[in-house]
Amino acid sequence: MDITTTTHDTAAILTVKGRVDALTAGDLESAINTIIDKGDRCIILDFSGLTYISSGGLRVLLATAKKLQNNGDRFMLCGLSIDVQKVMNLAGFTAIFSIYSSASEALDAVKKPVKPHS
């Protein structure tokens, strides 16, 4: 797995390539936590280069979503392959996460106001 981080004015984009499995899920979690620890509360995971995600990877996504629940926080996924999209559908994650077709589409969505939690 390879992770590249790009910081924009409105969000940090982590581009993930390869596989997120039991061996690499911890690396993904560490990369995300590093961004959060720096104070970035808007994170986009670009999965356009992701070929596989295991239950360990799904756990990382849920843990991150729980950390980013304050007003103004954003956590989005984009660029899901057909195989990764199937896993997200089966796990029910498409109802939980904001998913966009591309990183640019997700960045555009970040600029729109967030509805406050009710």
Image (cartoon, grey):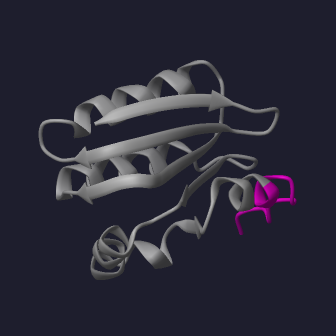
Q: Which residue does the image show at 75% across and 47% down from the upper left?
A: 72
> Which residue lies at the image location 55% right of the left edge and 60% below the top edge?
78
From the viewer's perspective, is residue 76 above or below residue 3? below
Q: What is the x, y in percent for residue 109?
A: 78, 61
Above or below 29: residue 71: below
Between 79 and 9, the one nearer to me in the picture: 79
Residue displayed at 71% across by 69% down:
118
**Which one is nearer the viewer's eye here, 31 or 63?**
31
Instruction: Name the foreground residue: 57 vs 67.
Output: 57
Q: Is residue 30 above or below residue 18?
A: above
Region rendered in magenta? 108-118
**67 and 21: which one is in front?**
21
Q: Does the magenta stretch include residue 84?
A: no
Residue reaching furthest top? 38
In the picture, measured across the screen, residue 50 lies left or right of residue 41, that is left
Q: Where is residue 96 in the image (x, y as percent from the top left)?
A: 48, 71
Residue at horizontal 68 percent and vertical 46 percent from the top: 73
Q: Is residue 108 above or below residue 16?
A: below
The secondary structure making up most of the magenta span is loop
Does residue 87 appear to the left or right of 115 in the view shown? left
Quarter of the N terminus within the rendering? top left
